[in-house]
Image: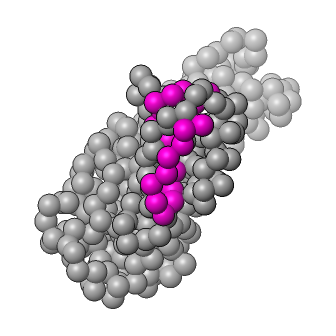
Amino acid sequence: MFFFRSLFKKSKALRTLRENRYLVSLFTLFLLVFIIYLMVYEGLSLIDTYYFMVTTATTVGYGDISPASPLGKVLVTAYMVIGIAIIGMFLGKVTDLMVEMSSKRRKGLVKMTAKTDLIIAGYPGDEKVQNIVSELRNDERYKSAAIVCVTRLITEMPAWMAQLDVGFVHGVASDTHVLGLAGIESASVALILANNPGAVESDDLSTSICAVINRVNPKVRTIIEKVRLDETIFAIANAHTIVDVASPSVLAQEVLDPGAIQLQNAIFSTNTPGTQFNMKYEGTESSWREIAHAILRLDAIPEGFQNPEQTQFNLLPGQEDRVLPGALIKYRGTRLLRLTG
C-alpha cells in the first residue's frame, strides 16, 4: 500500500509538467476551445463531450459520437494527433516512475510508511533470518505483523522476503536515517543478530545498533545476540534481553514471549531448582491424565511423553492420550522420579 501512496505523491510533481509546460499549456487551451465547440456547435452534452474526448484520446473510438460539421472534423483530427502524443508521453513517464519505485523498493531505498512491528538488524545469512521469520509467521500474533530487515550485507531484497511479506532497508542499522527508513518510530521490538557468529567484532556493531535504537526510541524492546562471553558492553548498551548465538526457533520465541530464553536457560541449568528430566515409564499402558496426576503428586511438573518407536515428543498431550510401557516422559523437578504405574 505504501508503494502506491508514494507513487501518487511523486506523480503530482512529475518533471514532465515542467519540461513540457508550453506544450501542455497549448494543449489545454486547444482542449478548452474544442470542448466549447462540441457543446455549442455540435450540441453535445457535458457527459457526451467527456465520453467522446476520452474514447478518442485513448484510441478506442467507438464511433457512436462524432462531429458532424467540417470544422469539427478538422478539430478532432488535430485533437487525435496531439492528445494521443500527450497521453503516450505521460503514460511513459508514469511507467518509468513505477519501475524506478519498484527498483528502489527491491534495493531497500524506500521508507516504510506503514507501522513497523519488528525490526531485524544484522544478517548472518538468508537461511537463519528466513527461518526466524517463518517461525514468527506460524504464530497468529505475527501472521500479518510488519517485519523489516535492515542490513548492508545484501544489496537487493531476496525472493523469500517478498514471499513472507518482509520489508527491506539497505544500510548500516546504527545510522539514525536508516532506522528512520525502517520505521523505528513505530517499532515495538528490535532483534539484533550477530552478523558473524564466529567473530567477537560482530558485538561492536550489535551494541552500537542497540544504543542508537534506545536513544531514538526507548520504548523498543531490544533482543541482542552476543558472541563474546563478557556481557559488560551489552549492559552499557541497555539491551533488554541478551542471548548467546541461538537457533531461529529460540530467537523467534523470545520475540513472541519475553523471558522465553531466561526460562529455557533456567530449565536446563543444573544451578536452578527445577531441572528438566527424562523418565522411562515402567508401568502398564495408562492415560496421560493418570500419569500427569502421579507426577504432580511427586512435586514435579509433567511436560509430555514419547512412546516407543515414535520420533518426536508429544509436548501438548491430551488427557486421554495413551502412554505405553517404555515411553520417555519429560518433566521438571528437583530429583529423578520413577513411575511403575
User: Which residue: 50% across, 46% down?
Assistant: 338
Q: Nearer the viewer, residue 315 or 120?
A: 315
Q: Is residue 271 magenta?
A: no
Question: In the picture, which quadrant includes the C terminus?
Answer: top right
Is residue 171 in view? Answer: no
With 182 as the anchor, is 315 left or right in this view?
right
Instruction: Give the quarter of the image for residue 79.
Output: top right
Instruction: Give the quarter of the image for residue 99.
Output: top left
Residue 293 in the image, given as x and y percentages of width and height = 68, 47
Vertical arrangement, residue 96 with respect to residue 205, above or below: above
Q: Residue furthest front?
A: 340
Instruction: Give the quarter of the image for residue 186.
Output: bottom right
With 171 as the anchor, is 328 left or right in this view?
right
Q: Main secondary structure of the magenta part?
A: loop
Vertical arrangement, residue 39 with respect to residue 10, above or below: above
User: Which residue: 24% across, 54% down?
Assistant: 124
Q: Residue furthest bottom?
A: 236
Q: Nearer the viewer, residue 138 or 101?
A: 138
Q: Nearer the viewer, residue 135 or 331?
A: 331
Residue 103 in the image, given as x and y percentages of width and height = 34, 44
Q: Is residue 324 magenta?
A: yes
Residue 115 in the image, given as x and y percentages of width and height = 58, 61
User: Which residue: 33% across, 74% down?
Assistant: 209
Residue 57 in the image, given as x and y percentages of width and height = 59, 27
| Residue numbers of the magenta segment | 322-341
User: Which residue: 29% across, 42% down?
Assistant: 127
